[in-house]
Amino acid sequence: MSARLLAAHECPALVEGQPLVWHCQTDGAHPRAAARQLLRQRLAHYLQQPGPEVPLQFIPGQAPAVAARWQGLPLSLSLSYCGGQALVGICPGASLGIDLATVTALPDWEAVARLYLGPLAVARLAGLAAGPRARQFARDWACLEAAGKCLGLALEEWSAERQQRLDSCQLSVGMVRWPAAADSAEFAWALARGPRARR
């Protein structure tokens, strides 16, 4: 599965089981507020409803949800914010999770990776120099969070059973820089898609 980040003004056609992910320019607004506004605008377009009438629900600790269906399919929604940037994701007919992580050198990377990413990730990261390690850690972390969101799982310590569940998601991961990002930060972003929903 491959994906690209869309600009906020783009509105490509929705296709069953194919996620769309937008980069949200915050323009000084809080990233969460800006992302929610863009999500409402995109849903209004696809559902052909006025923005204020889109039945969106935001419950703390849960993915956003919309009661309306698109061509009979449920719409999976996901948001992520990091370093003043935000991503908005929509997928008709399949579960979706997205995540955004800043590339930064972590002095305690090994302890964090051992706790949450597992032994294979620790071994992979240990074999890299500091710069590539920071980039790979951000990629691994974004994938972990995206898959967890896709499956509705809270962040927990690594286990083989949990990893097996996370591995059931299809993943796409990339690296990106935005000119407006503070300190020219580099980000890893990940998209996880689960199985298609039944109609």
Image: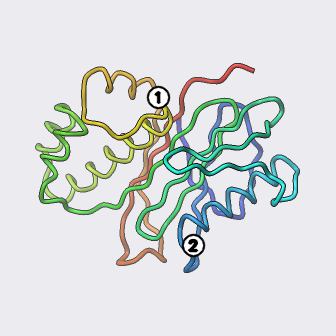
The residue shown at (26%, 49%) is 137
The image shows residue 37 at horizontal and vertical percentages of 68, 64
Q: Is residue 147 left or right of residue 48?
A: left
Task: Classify mark 2: helix, strand or loop.
Answer: loop
Quadrant containing the C terminus is top right
The residue shown at (79%, 36%) is 69
* Image label count: 2
Task: Classify mark 1: helix, strand or loop.
Answer: loop
- Determine which residue is flagged by label 2: 26
The residue shown at (35%, 61%) is 102
Please name the amino acid that badge 2 sits on: Thr
The image shows residue 157 at horizontal and vertical percentages of 25, 35
Q: Is residue 104 left or right of residue 199?
A: left
The disc at residue 169 is 1
The disc at residue 8 is none
Residue 66, quarter of picture: top right
